[in-house]
Image (cartoon, rainbow, N blue to C red):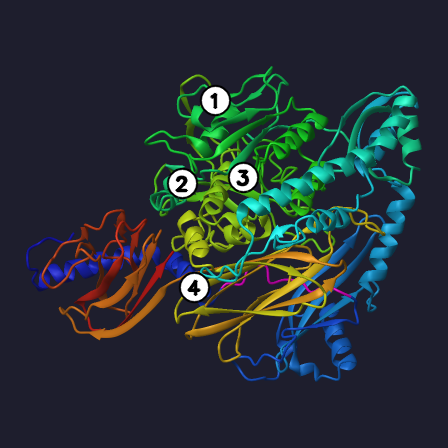
């Protein structure tokens, strides 16, 4: 090993031998890791998958003007690629119908659309015209013929209606084993109220309040005001709209309730926030309701259980709290379901939770350790075990675990002003969207509240529940943020983080099978939090990851009040800034989406909100496509996200009434018009593009409406920027290189510095912070390894590439990096990535 003594030739040879031996053991792993890192550095594009539409329809990469590519159009030899027979047919079809040379087209993705009732399967393909920048879609049936997706979908919808009518398939199957007079609890979702009329009527009574359909108009930048309504005025309008909608739901539900009571049936609950009635009915009556025109869908009632089985520093919350934000004034509901039907109540008697007591739905139920721990993750004010947002008010929306009572507890929370609903419970529905998913999507779409749900703990590792990896309901919904879990090994640095092995990740069923859940992750393992009485308890589960995200949103609302009316924007911000990737970070060599787009980083979310790298907009078919300009500096890692909603009151032939009414696409161009990346999923209600800016200037995000079926959409936009640096130079043996300077912004969560050296040489990497503390290998004046920078680690001198990791940085300003050529001379490359 190295010593502080000056080494002679014998020592040098000994070191080289040791280096060669160690390196020979690591070569295969290093090649794999370096390969993955190169891919990541070039630019990752999340969810760049399938195109959608009719076989004859195409979409353009740019709806404004053709996008020139960095590389000029070249003939693509598809014969040398692994191209399927269907892809070859699609190439010929698009080339013929669009009068394009087949050699000019390239297959960029292949997938399939499945229709379970008609048993039809269509090959789906996306083809890129590298000359014009257009993307074309094609579908091919099992006989090899060009197919029409819309007609296939209409056929599936008709088959569904003929078989099930208005019954949820799970309820239909249940009824097959019941006698005519057997009873079962069902949820009856009715046809929609006229929400738009209600909103317009309320707004007509407030002519001076500037809103869009009742929502506060967000400023376009940090300094703009433009006479925008105050948050208090906007809250008054939203509350009034909510009260009027409550009346409309009651009026909508009354005829059904009266009819059921007249027949002697008891109604268990009628929702105040959705057109939904719960009742215990006979099979005969359920089949009769199937014929009522005011009935939309009849759902099977289910039971739900809690999603059971250092976190705050790991997701970089202390930085935001240090800025003076703790969620003060924000109301968060902890929606809880009982496993045994008796204990679901948050114990506000705990000395570190009493300050957050906002009220309890059912005060007759016992205190729950699970609910109290969830509340502690959000609101604990302990000096060390502090929650993410200790200034919030917590509502204990504690249901008894029955289907109807979960809706009732959630309604109660909305009626008491909840701006965020945190759901750490669920049930397995075989990846099919159910009534609870639809309800919470409805809460977001109709009432503009944020909802966060646990992904579930059904991973396939020993000790997990279910072991089928399925996301649980209500985390299958479109509009809420579904949260997976990671394991931070009880350390605040990111070097040892990995996926929580019980965290669910199987995606919901969708027409093209390309929906992605969860959206993000948070720490879920060994969470120490408040429990009943005055104690503390350590548990694991995505139950404790979800409230961390709820708390993060509360911090953002505390920072910028209008976000409470724009859940689409908060979702975009959370996703754009979840840049801690414990799967594919610098020390990992695999990629998958089981973590979502990453683990949340509150300090990055704060920066996005503080810099106004976000926007909330009201879009119609005539306002799209649209361009969004944003600045990025050369070398910055940029993630850009758009998010919109599913509509929970759609009709027509939809087999699932919680569906997307729009398919929006996202693609980015650099200041010179060159393509930087794109995302084109079919079945997600968000698109994410990540790239490295190769030139400074104003980039353009093109948002295109490939499909737009309703009159309007709420759109959330957000992006994050993370500096990266690449330094190259030459150094001679036994000499130090020059020191390269780079800027570490305030609140930087993570710094990863990597040295690549010529083959056959041995260079040592060092990093100096702004206080001149050093971490790294030898220098010409200090023949020892150092880890003087707080929270830092060095790879050791035999590694290739060598790295220094600081996680998190405790200072900001100008840092430096350089290398010492212990053996050999040549050119080196040092890259610095910050988060």
Q: Is residue 472 above or below residue 786?
A: above
Quadrant where the C terminus sits is bottom left
Q: SS at mark 3? A: loop
Whole-angstrom CA distance, mark 3 to mark 4, is 28 Å
Nearest to viewer (mark 3 / mark 4) = 4
Examine the rendering and report whether any part of residue 309 can be seen. Answer: no
Residue 524 left/right relative to 199: left
Cβ atoms under marks 3 and 2 closer than 8 Å: no
Residue neighbourhood size for the residue with mark 4, other residues' Cα within 10 Å, grouped as few (<14), some (14–19), many (≥20): many
Q: SS at mark 2? A: loop
Is residue 50 located in the magenta-colored stretch of the structure?
Answer: yes
Predominant SS of the magenta segment: loop
**Front-most of residues 665 and 145:** 665
Q: Position of residue 624 (x, y in %)?
A: 67, 68
Q: Position of residue 387 (x, y in %)?
A: 41, 34
Whole-angstrom CA distance, mark 4 to mark 2, is 24 Å
Q: Which residues are magenta?
A: 44-53
In the picture of the structure, the residue carrying the numbered disc 1 is 348
Labelled disc at residue 637: 4
Labelled disc at residue 503: 3
């Amino acid at each position: 090993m190295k010593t502080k003594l000056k080494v002679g030739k014998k020592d040098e040879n000994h070191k080289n031998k040791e280096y060669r031996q160690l390196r020979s053991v690591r070569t295969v792993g290093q090649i794999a890791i370096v390969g993955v890192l190169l891919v990541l550095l070039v630019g990752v594009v999340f969810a760049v998958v399938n195109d959608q539409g009719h076989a004859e329809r195409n979409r353009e990469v740019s709806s404004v003007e053709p996008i020139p590519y960095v590389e000029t159009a070249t003939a693509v030899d598809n014969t040398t690629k692994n191209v399927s027979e269907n892809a070859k047919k699609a190439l010929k079809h698009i080339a013929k119908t669009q009068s394009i040379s087949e050699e000019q087209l390239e297959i960029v993705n292949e997938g399939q659309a499945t229709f379970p009732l008609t048993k039809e399967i269509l090959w789906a393909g996306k083809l890129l015209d590298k000359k014009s920048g257009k993307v074309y879609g094609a579908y091919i049936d099992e006989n090899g013929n060009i197919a029409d997706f819309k007609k296939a979908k209409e056929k599936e919808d008709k088959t569904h209606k003929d078989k099930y009518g208005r019954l949820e398939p799970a309820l239909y199957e249940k009824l097959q084993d019941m006698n005519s007079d057997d009873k079962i609890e069902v949820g009856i979702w009715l046809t929609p109220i006229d929400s738009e009329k209600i909103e317009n009527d309320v707004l007509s009574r407030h002519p001076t309040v500037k809103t869009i359909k009742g929502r506060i108009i967000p400023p376009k930048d940090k300094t703009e005001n433009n006479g925008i309504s105050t948050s208090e005025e906007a809250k008054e309008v939203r509350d009034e709209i909510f009260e009027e909608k409550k009346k409309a739901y009651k009026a909508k539900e009354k005829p059904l309730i009266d009819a059921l009571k007249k027949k002697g049936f008891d109604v268990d609950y009628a929702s105040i926030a959705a057109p939904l009635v719960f009742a215990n009915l006979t099979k005969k009556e359920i089949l009769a309701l199937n014929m009522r025109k005011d009935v939309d869908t009849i759902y099977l009632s289910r039971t739900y259980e809690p999603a059971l089985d250092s976190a705050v520093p790991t997701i970089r919350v202390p930085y935001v709290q240090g800025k003076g934000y703790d969620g003060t004034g924000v109301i968060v509901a902890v929606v809880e379901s009982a496993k045994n039907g008796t204990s679901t109540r948050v114990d506000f008697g705990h000395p570190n939770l009493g300050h957050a007591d906002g009220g309890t739905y059912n005060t007759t139920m016992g205190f729950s350790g699970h609910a109290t721990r969830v509340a502690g993750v959000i609101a604990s004010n302990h000096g060390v075990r502090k929650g993410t947002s200790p200034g919030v008010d917590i509502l204990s929306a504690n249901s008894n675990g029955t289907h109807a009572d979960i809706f009732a507890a959630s309604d109660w929370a909305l009626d008491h002003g909840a701006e965020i609903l945190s759901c750490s419970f669920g049930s397995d529905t075989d990846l099919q969207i159910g009534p609870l998913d639809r309800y919470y999507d409805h809460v977001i779409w109709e009432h503009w509240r944020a909802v966060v749900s646990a992904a579930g703990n059904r991973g396939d590792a020993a000790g997990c529940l279910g072991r089928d990896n399925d996301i649980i309901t209500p985390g299958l919904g479109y509009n809420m943020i579904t949260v997976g879990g990671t394991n931070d090994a009880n350390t605040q640095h990111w070097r040892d983080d990995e996926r929580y092995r019980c965290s669910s990740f199987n995606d919901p069923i969708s027409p093209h099978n390309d929906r992605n859940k969860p959206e993000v992750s948070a720490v879920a393992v060994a969470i120490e939090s408040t429990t009943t009485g005055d104690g503390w308890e350590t548990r694991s589960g995505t139950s404790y990851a979800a409230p961390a995200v709820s708390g993060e949103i509360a911090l953002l609302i505390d920072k910028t009040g209008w976000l409470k009316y724009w859940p689409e924007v908060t979702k975009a911000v959370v996703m754009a800034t979840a840049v801690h990737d414990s799967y594919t970070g610098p020390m990992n060599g695999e990629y998958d989406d089981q973590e979502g787009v990453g683990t949340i980083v509150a300090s990055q979310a704060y920066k996005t909100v503080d810099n106004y790298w976000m926007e909330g907009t009201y879009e119609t078919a005539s306002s799209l496509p649209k361009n969004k300009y944003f600045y990025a500096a050369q070398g910055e890692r940029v993630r850009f996200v758009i998010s919109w909603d599913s509509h929970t009151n759609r009709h027509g032939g939809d087999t699932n009434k919680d569906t997307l009414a729009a398919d929006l696409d996202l693609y980015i161009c650099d200041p010179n018009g060159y393509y930087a990346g794109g995302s084109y999923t079919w079945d997600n209600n968000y698109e994410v593009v990540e790239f490295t800016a190769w030139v400074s200037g104003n980039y353009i995000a093109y948002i295109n409406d490939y499909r737009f079926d309703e009159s309007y959409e709420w759109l959330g936009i957000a992006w994050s920027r993370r500096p990266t640096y690449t330094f190259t130079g030459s150094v001679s043996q036994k000499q130090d290189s020059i020191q390269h300077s780079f800027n570490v912004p305030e609140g930087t969560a993570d710094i990863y510095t990597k040295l690549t050296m010529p083959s056959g040489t041995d260079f040592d990497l060092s990093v100096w912070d702004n206080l001149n503390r050093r971490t790294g290998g030898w220098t010409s004046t200090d023949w020892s390894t150092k880890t003087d920078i707080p929270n830092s680690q060095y790879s050791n001198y035999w590694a290739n590439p060598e790295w220094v990791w600081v996680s998190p940085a405790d200072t900001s300003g100008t840092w430096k990096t350089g290398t010492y050529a212990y053996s050999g001379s040549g050119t080196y490359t040092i890259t610095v990535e910050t988060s």
